[in-house]
Amino acid sequence: MFISRFGGADRKVARLPALPVEFGTDRQRPSVRCQPPRMGEHNAEVLGEAGFSTAEIAGLAAAGVIAARTGASS
């Protein structure tokens, strides 16, 4: 099959195309190991590393310039 399923917990289960290749003598297929980040999940970390203060990041989120972190943190 070339469709993989992943997800669960607090996120929906997604069906994605699987890679049609196999590796090694046991013919393992590569798989998706984690879900992509949620909208705004890493804004504070990325902008903080770029030199923005916590207050500046909060101001950007309040002004709608960046997406606010969505969902529960994991």
Image (cartoon, rainbow, N blue to C red):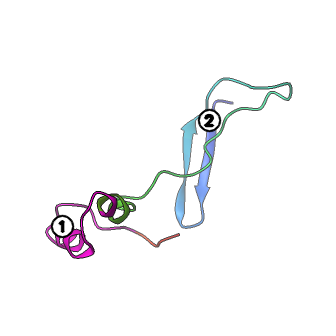
Position of 26 with respect to 19 (left or right) is: right
Name the outermost residue toward the bottom.
55
Q: Which portion, as a residue range, is magenta?
A: 48-70
Query: Which of the pair 58/6 is nearer the observer?
Result: 58
Q: Is residue 71 above or below residue 7?
A: below
The location of residue 50, given as percent across then percent down, is 28, 57
Position of 55 with respect to 31 (left or right) is: left
Q: Residue at the location (33% across, 65% down)?
A: 44
Q: Is residue 58 above or below residue 49?
A: below
Query: Which of the pair 6/25 is nearer the observer?
Result: 25
Q: Amino acid at mark 1?
A: Leu
| Residue at numbered disc 2 | 3
Is the N terminus in the top left, top right, bottom left or bottom right quadrant? top right
Name the outermost residue toward the right.
25
User: Is-magenta flag for residue 58?
Assistant: yes
Helix, strand or loop status at disc 1: helix
Q: Amino acid at mark 2?
A: Ile
Q: CA distance from mark 2 to mark 1?
A: 39 Å
Residue 60's disc number: 1
Place residue 8 in its image quadrant.
Answer: bottom right
The location of residue 28, given as percent across then percent down, is 77, 32
Helix, strand or loop status at disc 2: strand
Number of labels in the image equals 2
Q: Is residue 30 above or below residue 9?
A: above
